[in-house]
């Protein structure tokens, strides 16, 4: 893509200045984290899907680096640099470039170099209040920039976890369902397998070994597996431990003995994942599904209701906003609220801003404790294009 | 003005070099270096209008993509790895029957709980819980690996680039599993690795390939046909 015109540059700068001004007035300190980041952290946290879209390179000293594909991780690292014990509440705002390889070639809506203006809030104990604050600032930001009409879409990852916890399931299945949640086709296949009671397949000798392992004595089970490996001449030579191999064989043995997932349970999960309603009806709809299944989703549902109350009290009209349980299933580091702001009223609307809660991220970046964290980023080129009617 | 020549990229080193040279020989199209012995240009004896460019198999892929050479001999693995949408930039003219190698997913053979790709994602979950990081896959086939793993719903991994002795990385502890080429499986076995049942990514061999972006004339198209017929007749 050719370099942007001076005029567009100026328009983007003016837009960013006004967004930042609003964020700073709300108590968010402006920060400018490094554009060049250690590749390791991104690749370990975000995985190969984003790596395929990240500009990774090795510098002359042999260090593996990347051009930041977004600003949430760099700002989180900056927070941890300043507060290694992660005990301080902090609010940051930023505007700066991020870089993503576009497999189909860069375009106006999918540029490979774009500027994100955003906010991140760390350590705020009242999570619902912080969620509402972030949504309000994002909405006010795009509104004051001149965007109208726009649509709000919400989801909530924590509700899914609450559902899985409330259902009568063995823990090993819970772990799997939680994990596969992020990949809908595989999740669907897994649910089908569990419901059909399909038995795990595999090497006959290994299946026979698994069947001899008693679940009540893990030490003995490890000994049996060690003997088997010894007899077969298979040395333990990598990072996976004997304990890990044994644990999976025990799960396998348990699956061989287990009854299939009850059909009602699979149905409840399917019903839940089909919820797509006006946002203010979501809590009731989900409560009804829970009641039908005889389960209580407890605090997670009250959080959903209270958060929407707080967003409305902040002056955001939730009338046209929608809530979908499926929404956010492709954004693996989110842990609670997810939302986005879409320009235009049609189905091919373009996402101009998005955000959500990511309480697990800072811990995995090295924080000694879990840190409540929520934020939002505005895609400034798209916002400008939407305002000018180019999107 | 002399008619434009058909330029052919031929591997100048690596595992495809000797087989490529003898295939031309058998086809009655012996390759001769022009100029001094270490030069990288040549001619085909008995076929006028052809210019040979000696390059590495990987460089041949890039030159084909750019259209700087008309045709080339290189491994399908390199083409699929380098060109995400291979058919759009090149035309596969003929498989040549040498340079056979399978690109496969292999794990340590003591992973007796793992037999298929689907197991890998479960292991990734467990591994992340136990070690606080993703499974590492050592490979030089970044794109083939990403595409194949995505198609199998495996996401909890990261790639560490490896350009040599990839099969040693799991035992050395720098990766947990590998994606690499194998011909007989002997090297994998010697390194206590096993293939996954559904872990065959690509059955590769050397191909004669034409560049869509090259400047084609009636003459070069005709020469391309001659080279293809002679080489596939001899392979």
Image: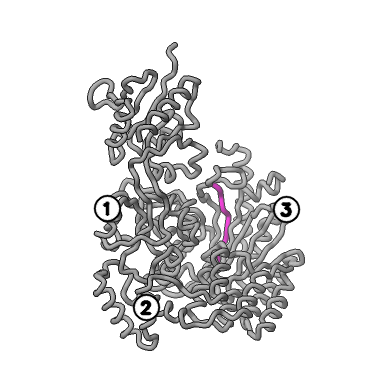
The CA distance from mark 2 to mark 1 is 35 Å
Residue marked by disc 2: A208
Q: Describe the element under mark 3 as helix, strand or loop.
A: loop
- Above or below B203: residue A218: below
Q: Describe the element under mark 1 as helix, strand or loop.
A: loop
- Horizontal relation, residue A17 to residue A71: left or right: right
Residue A124: percent from left, percent from top = 55, 73
Residue closest to the far top: B1
Q: Describe the element under mark 2 as helix, strand or loop.
A: helix
Q: Which residues are magenta?
A: A113-121
The CA distance from mark 2 to mark 3 is 60 Å
Residue A267: percent from left, percent from top = 64, 76
Residue A353 highlighted magenta (yes or no): no
Is residue A123 at least partly visible in the picture? Answer: no
Q: Residue at 29%, 29% (x, y): give it.
A: B25
The quadrant in which the N terminus of chain A is found is top right
Q: Residues within 10 Å of mark 2 (few under 14, many from 20)?
A: few
Give the colouring mode of the picture: one colour
Residue A118 highlighted magenta (yes or no): yes
The CA distance from mark 1 to mark 3 is 54 Å
Residue marked by disc 3: A344
Q: Residues within 10 Å of mark 1 (few under 14, many from 20)?
A: few
Residue closest to the far bottom: A216
- Horizontal relation, residue A216 to residue A49: left or right: left
- Above or below A235: residue A73: above
Residue marked by disc 1: B165
> The disc numbered 1 marks a residue on which chain?
B
* Residue toward you, A8 or B143: B143
């Amino acid at each position: 893509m050719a370099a942007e015109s001076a005029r567009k540059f100026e328009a983007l700068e003016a837009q960013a200045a006004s967004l930042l001004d609003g964020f700073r007035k709300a108590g968010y300190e402006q920060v400018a984290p490094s554009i060049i980041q250690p590749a390791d952290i991104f690749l370990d946290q975000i995985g190969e899907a984003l790596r395929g879209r990240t500009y990774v390179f090795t510098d002359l000293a042999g260090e593996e680096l990347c051009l930041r594909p977004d600003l949430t991780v760099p700002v989180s690292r900056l927070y941890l640099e300043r507060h290694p014990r992660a005990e301080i509440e902090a609010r940051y705002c930023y505007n700066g470039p991020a870089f993503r390889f576009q497999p189909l070639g860069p375009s106006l809506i999918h540029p490979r170099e774009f500027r994100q203006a955003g906010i991140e809030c760390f350590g705020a104990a009242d999570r619902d209040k912080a969620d509402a604050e972030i949504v309000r600032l994002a909405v006010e930001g795009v509104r004051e920039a001149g965007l109208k009409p726009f649509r709000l879409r919400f989801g909530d990852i924590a509700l899914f976890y609450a559902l899985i916890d409330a259902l009568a399931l063995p823990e090993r299945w819970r772990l799997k369902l939680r994990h596969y949640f992020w990949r809908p086709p595989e999740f669907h296949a897994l649910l089908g397998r569990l419901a059909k009671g399909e038995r795990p397949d595999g090497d006959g000798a290994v299946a026979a070994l698994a069947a001899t392992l008693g679940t009540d004595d893990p030490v003995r089970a490890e000994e049996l597996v060690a003997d088997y490996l010894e007899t077969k001449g298979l040395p333990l030579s990598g990072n996976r431990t004997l304990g890990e191999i044994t644990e999976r064989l025990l799960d396998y043995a348990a699956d061989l003995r287990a009854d299939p997932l009850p059909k009602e349970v699979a149905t409840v999960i399917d019903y839940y994942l089909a919820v797509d309603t006006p946002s203010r009806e979501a809590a009731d709809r989900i409560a009804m599904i829970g009641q039908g299944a005889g389960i209580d989703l407890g605090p997670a549902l009250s959080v959903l209701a209270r958060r929407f109350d707080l967003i409305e009290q902040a002056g955001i009209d939730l009338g046209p906003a929608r809530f979908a349980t499926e929404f956010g299933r492709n954004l693996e580091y989110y842990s609670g609220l997810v939302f986005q702001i879409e320009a235009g009223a049609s189905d091919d609307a373009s996402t101009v801003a998005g955000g959500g809660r990511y309480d697990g991220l800072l811990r995995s970046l090295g924080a000694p404790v879990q840190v409540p964290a929520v934020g939002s980023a505005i895609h400034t080129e798209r916002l400008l294009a939407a305002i000018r009617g180019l999107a | 003005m002399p008619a434009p020549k058909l330029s052919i990229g031929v591997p100048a080193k690596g595992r495809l070099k000797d087989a490529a040279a003898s295939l031309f020989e058998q086809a009655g199209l012996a390759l001769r270096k022009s100029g001094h012995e270490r030069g990288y240009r040549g001619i085909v004896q008995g076929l006028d209008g052809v210019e040979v460019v000696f390059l590495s198999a990987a460089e041949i892929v890039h030159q084909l993509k750019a259209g700087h050479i008309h045709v080339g001999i290189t491994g399908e693995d390199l083409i699929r790895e380098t060109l995400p949408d291979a058919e759009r930039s090149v035309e596969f003219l003929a498989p040549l029957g040498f340079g056979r190698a399978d690109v496969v997913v292999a794990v340590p053979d003591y992973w007796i709980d793992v037999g298929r790709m689907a197991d890998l994602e479960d292991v990734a979950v467990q591994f992340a819980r136990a070690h606080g990081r993703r499974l590492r896959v050592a490979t030089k086939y970044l794109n083939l690996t990403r595409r194949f793993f995505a198609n199998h719903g495996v996401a909890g991994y990261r790639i560490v680039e490896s350009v040599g002795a990839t099969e040693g990385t799991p035992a050395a502890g720098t990766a947990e599993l590998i994606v690499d080429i194998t011909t007989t499986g002997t090297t994998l076995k010697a390194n206590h690795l096993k293939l996954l049942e559904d872990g065959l990514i690509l059955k590769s061999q050397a191909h004669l390939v034409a560049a869509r972006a090259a400047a084609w004339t009636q003459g070069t198209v005709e020469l391309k046909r001659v080279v293809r017929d002679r080489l596939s007749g001899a392979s």
